[in-house]
Image (cartoon, rainbow, N blue to C red):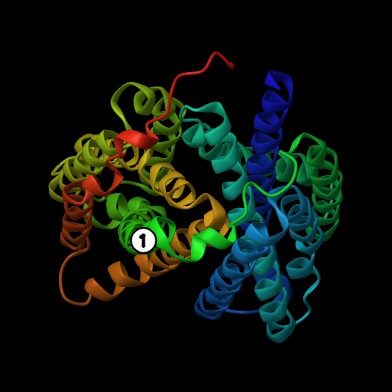
Amino acid sequence: MERSLRAARVATYVYFVLNGTLMGAWVVHIPAVEERVGITHAALGGLLVLLGLGAFAGMQVAGRLTDRLGTRTVVPVAGVLCAACLVLPGLAPNPWTLACALTVFGFANGCLDVSMNAHAVHVEKAYRRPVMSGFHATFSVGGVLAALVAAAAAGIGLGPVAALVVLGAAGVVTALLAARGLLPGAPSTAGPEAEDGPAAAGRSNSRGRIRVLAALALMVMLSEGAANDWSALHLKDVLGAPATTAAFAYGTYAAAMTVGRLLADRTVTRWGSMAVLRYGAATAAVGITLAALAPWVWTAFAGWALFGLGLSGCVPQLFSAAGHADPAAAGANVSRVAGLGYLGMLAGPAVIGWLTHLTALNHTFLLLTLLCAATAATAGVLRPAPAVEREPTTVG
């Protein structure tokens, strides 16, 4: 049992790295695709919305299929589909075909995202201790891997399409090989007694809790999306830093988030997920306020680092709580929370951009302060009932 559980954990790591690598491969090839199709930055921004909408649709479909068929079936299929679709944007000859390619690739990515997170919830439940944040940390590793592979491909003269084909083919093989380690079968099924009595009441309560978790995911991931697109511009346009220095704003934020996620599982084990969400969101609120009001570049770096560190453990706790709320509907619940959160991540840059018409860029970040403070104040939704507290296990 311990051996199969460790294999399931390793397989989950593989799928998170795979997802990060596939998405990273697309991101690093965006300039080449934009040049090939011959579109403006504004047109590309509109097409990227289709990627997000496709991902949202994929999340909703995969969530229900995961509950019906089990993660061992859906995760590898989604992984193969996502890897196979990676090359589609690179092959698109015009904006219309690129729009279709991004929608399909986004759909496949959404399927993989939700199904692998649902499997991560099952692994965490089997371990009886927090392991979710570590999975999310390895997603960032995939992004770094994609950048390194893209640089190596360019160094040997491999074109963008060829590089995407190679990465996609490797992704298909990886998704199939890693499937052997996944936990078998569906995690649980709802019996006839689930339709009434205490089970029905519990299910009604879980639906209300899922709505709160989804709202929190929206606020947290909107904050993440804003940092992704505006951190470097903040240093360049507000503090007058050179472009090379300004780029380190996002690097500081991303590095702090990765480190925080690597440490978050141990923190949750000791202090609980509610404390990680509450104090993490509070730390993020302090960090983004410091960045917004910073008079010097180094102060802004410190603010962005605190922002990334504070946010690092928030999303994994929300996804984990959604999956544990109702084992019979883990996939659907994760899809609801992840889907609304993903929309928040897409909306974040646009919301900040719109607010810049009303006030200075750094002052718009105070909206993120309010969102993080509201998240900290609502963290009590993760307070566990005594009956579901997890016991320690000796599995490594």
- Residue extending furthest bottom? 96
Quarter of the image where the C terminus is located? top right
> Where, by quadrant of the figure, is residue 43 drawn?
bottom right
Quarter of the image where the N terminus is located? top right
Where is residue 111 shown, x and y percent of the image?
65, 61
Q: Residue at x 78, y 60 (%)?
A: 81
The relative height of residue 301 versus residue 214 in the rendered view (above or below) is above
- Residue pointed to by mark 1: 201
The relative height of residue 71 versus residue 1 in the rendered view (above or below) is below
> Where, by quadrant of the figure, is residue 261 drawn?
top left
Q: Nearer the viewer, residue 79 or 233?
A: 79
Q: Residue at x 46, y 30 (%)?
A: 130
Task: Say which element carries label 1.
Answer: helix
Q: Nearer the viewer, residue 93 or 368?
A: 368
The relative height of residue 281 versus residue 137 in the rendered view (above or below) is below
Where is residue 292 shown, x and y percent of the image?
18, 51
Q: Residue at x 25, y 51 (%)?
A: 240
Q: Nearer the viewer, residue 253 or 4?
A: 4
Q: Is residue 323 left or right of residue 59?
A: left
Disc 1 crowd rating (10 Å Cα; few below 14, some 14-19, many 20+) is few
Where is residue 193 shown, x and y percent of the image?
52, 59
> Where, by quadrant of the figure, is residue 55 drawn?
bottom right
The amino acid marked with disc number 1 is Ala
Where is residue 16 shown, x and y percent of the image?
63, 42
- Residue extending furthest top? 394
Q: Is residue 70 left or right of residue 287?
A: right
